[in-house]
């Protein structure tokens, strides 16, 4: 399958899963995680109409968002294409775990930070955001799979952390993010997703995070259907779309 075919197949599967949970496909944000992809692939997806992209590392986020912006500006200036695409329309997501020493660049280059999991990190984000005098939106990463090696706030601590971040001037919590265990065991997968959904709903119901608390980021290439069926409204998909190029070159690198 070509990149375009994989992309269209993904959109179709998202629509089917959305319908199965009584929602419309437009209600599900699809963040294409381009870490396995090439710049050409990102450009092609933009031309196909996609706008939300994610990276797992700050350096890559910085390089790629800058490169894509430059490409769009040049494209606009040269007038070669009939449809101008506003460089500001491309939204970059930081999906990886946020590192303290990378907060400044991450805030600068991303629209939404998915992987915040401590008060200390949120405070650092607030500090940087205040200095740059801008609002920053983030998601709290929750460890609902219970695996020790995973990042994420323990579920019982999430509500309190949302309340604490609510008092910060520049930072707002837009919702929660979780990663399920890498397993084919559907009951384990769904268990983790359902716990995160319940937490998300409870915080919404109690008014935590305010009106903007509305994003539940869960689901990757192997488990996005289950995630959507469990209430996710934001999936982060990489290999299912970017596949071959990245995988192949990673394997090359590994075998050298
Ligand atoms: C890489 C990554 C993804 C995408 O993973 P795929 O399995 O390639 O779809 C999603 N979320 C996070 C946090 C990631 O690091």
Image (spheres, helix red, strand yellow):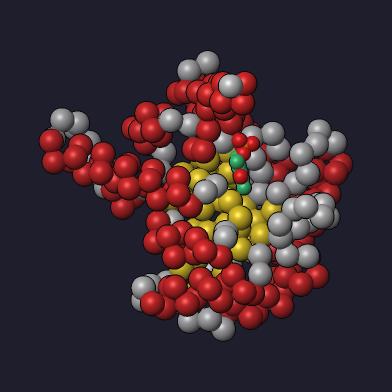
Left or right? Give the position of 64 relative to 230. Answer: left
Identified at 71% across, 78% down, the residue is 160
Identified at 71% across, 37% down, the residue is 223
Identified at 29% across, 46% down, the residue is 69
Q: Quadrant of residue 50?
A: top left
Q: Quadrant of residue 152?
A: bottom right
Q: Position of residue 193 (x, y in %)?
A: 76, 50
The quadrant the C terminus occupies is top right
The image quadrant in which ligand 1 is located:
top right
Identity of the residue furthest to the front in this view: 256
Q: Is residue 210 visible?
A: no
Q: Quadrant of residue 197?
A: bottom right
Q: Is residue 133 visible?
A: yes
Taking 248 as reference, is 130 above or below it? below
Q: Position of residue 2 (x, y in %)?
A: 48, 18
Identity of the residue furthest to the left in this view: 78
Q: In terms of depth relative to the viewer, which is nearer, 108 or 175? A: 108
Identity of the residue furthest to the top in this view: 1
Q: Position of residue 175 (x, y in %)?
A: 61, 63
């Amino acid at each position: 399958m070509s990149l375009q075919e994989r992309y269209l197949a993904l959109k179709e599967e998202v629509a089917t899963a959305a319908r199965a949970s009584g929602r419309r496909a437009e209600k599900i944000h699809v963040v294409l995680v381009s870490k396995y992809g090439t710049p050409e692939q990102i450009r092609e997806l933009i031309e196909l109409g996609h706008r939300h992209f994610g990276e797992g590392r700050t350096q890559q986020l910085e390089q790629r968002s800058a490169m894509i912006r430059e490409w769009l500006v040049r494209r606009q200036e040269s007038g070669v294409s009939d449809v101008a695409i506003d460089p500001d329309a491309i939204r970059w997501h930081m999906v990886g775990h946020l590192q303290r020493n990378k907060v400044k660049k991450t805030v600068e280059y991303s629209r939404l930070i998915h992987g915040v999991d401590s008060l200390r990190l949120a405070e650092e984000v607030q500090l940087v955001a205040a200095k740059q005098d801008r609002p920053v939106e983030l998601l709290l990463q929750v460890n609902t799979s219970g695996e020790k090696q995973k990042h994420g706030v323990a579920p019982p601590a999430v509500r309190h952390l949302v309340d604490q971040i609510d008092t910060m001037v520049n930072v707002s919590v837009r919702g929660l993010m979780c990663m399920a265990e890498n397993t084919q065991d559907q009951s384990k997968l769904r268990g983790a997703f359902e716990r995160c959904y319940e937490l998300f709903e409870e915080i919404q119901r109690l008014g935590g995070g305010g009106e903007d608390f509305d994003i539940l980021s869960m689901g990757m290439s192997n488990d996005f259907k289950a995630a959507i069926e469990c209430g996710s409204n934001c999936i982060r998909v990489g290999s299912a779309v970017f596949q071959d190029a990245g995988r192949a070159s990673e394997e090359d690198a590994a075998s050298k």
